[in-house]
Image: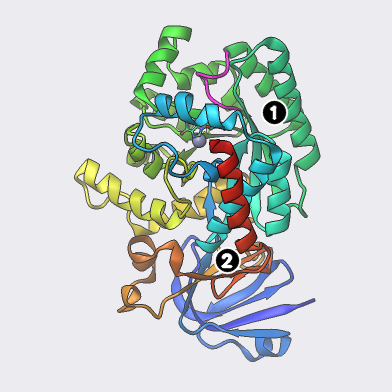
Amino acid sequence: MSRLLIDNGYFVTMDEQMPQYQGWMSIEGDRIAALGEGKAPEREIELATETLDGSGLLFMPGLVNTHGHAAMSLLRGLADDLALQDWLQNHMWPTEAKFTGDDVYWGSALAAAEMIKSGTTTFVDMYDHMHRVGEVVEKSGMRASLTRGVIGLCPEDVQKAKLADAIQFAKDWHGAANGRISVMISPHAPYTCPPDYILKFVEAAHELDLAMHTHMSETIAEVEQNVRDYGYRPVEHLDRLGMFGRPTLVAHAVHLNDEEIALLAERNVYVSHNPVSNLKLASGVARVPELMRAGVTVSLGTDSAASNNNLDLFQEITMAALLHKGVSGDPTVIPAAEALRMGTVNGARSIGLGGVTGQLKAGLKADFIALSIAQAHFVPLTDYISHLAYAARGSDVAHVWVDGKQLLRDGQLLTLDEEKILAEAERCFQRLKG
Ligand SMILES: CSC[C@H]1O[C@@H](n2cnc3c(O)ncnc32)[C@H](O)[C@@H]1O
Ligand SMILES: [Zn+2]
């Protein structure tokens, strides 16, 4: 079996003690075999079948983006500066109604290219035509948790067909791509799926033994509408429907009261915080410090490139570290290490991949990235964790590996044809806008 030895690099491991050091790491097959401080031991040098000089590089776990809609990269810049419901109902949904499987393939490929180049190795994707997203994941070499998002504002026969599609997708793709793909079950949101319909998704998740993913409490209007229509705020509503009896990842969770935060903690619900999208759509600022204090695992998502407008998770890390200081007036909330945890190990945990990816540790999957640090904004080398949270950008990423396979070398994609993807995505958009 091949064994890669990386010597003389800087490392941020994201394991419990958060060590940062100059040292070495060896990769055997798809796993991290060993790592340590200082010069690589003789034995590691002997075992290596390939060596990489890590000088000038900072190695860390690949980033985990826990909420997005990859194919919507085709809609980047189409409708900016709008509130959620106007943006969705009058701009996104009418254009998405014209999406073919081909559009989803090229839009998702565009997103995969952008994510790999900016250091994301694992992503959550909620959309339609999901087998085409699965194909992109297979080809790109990324790791993903995929889910057929279902909007239930339609006649009963269409509702039935959509649920059947979500179930079939789960049966066909859970565990695919050598285990790099897992599947979740997703009613899109409490305001787009009636309660009896959500119940059917909960039932399916139980039968298939899968986790659930949904949008929740993104805007005040949504919370108020939920109370008007169903008598409860979204958290209690979903809890009563049994959703939190499954492992559940909720996106946004912006508008929460203290009781709701306590309930999410009690039910072990995972929250995907999407600060840039929430700011752009003026949805509000999630109560992340309170969620964390209550013990909720909070990770980071970009949402789509149509509401962000990029998929650079380093931007979310920096935003999470800054935003909550500004809002709370407390500079100690979400320190650099916590923001980095949100973008790595918390993300992995939130999708059932804790102890699999999100950290550099012997035995874990070899999903890691290297940033080029011989640049002005990484000097002086005071604290790598600080630099990663506050100074780094996705464009600093030079190399990316998933499952021990290199996907990006010196900024060049190895598994995807970037030139073709850019051209095909532009072609898809020209047809969609017509
Ligand atoms: C059919 S699943 C995907 C569905 O979600 C829509 N969407 C994109 N961003 C958001 C958001 O921030 N809140 C709610 N829904 C969103 C997207 O347009 C797709 O239709
Ligand atoms: Zn979303």
Q: Earlier in the sequence, mark 1 or mark 2?
A: 1
Q: Is residue 231 magenta?
A: no
Residue 210 percent coordinates (x, y): 69, 34
Between the C-alphas of marks 1 and 2, the distance is 31 Å
Which amino acid is tagged 1? Ala
Which amino acid is tagged 2? Phe
Q: Residues within 10 Å of mark 1 (few under 14, many from 20)?
A: many
Part of the protein shown in magenta: 187-194
Residue 98 percent coordinates (x, y): 62, 31
* Rendered view: 374 above or below 142: below
Q: Residue at x 71, y 23 (%)?
A: 163
Instruction: Look at mark 2 in the image and give the residue it sits on.
Output: 368
The number of numbered badges drawn on the structure is 2
Residue 32 percent coordinates (x, y): 65, 69
Instruction: Look at mark 1 in the image and give the residue it sits on.
Output: 205
Q: Residue furthest left?
A: 329
Residue 382 seen by the camera = no
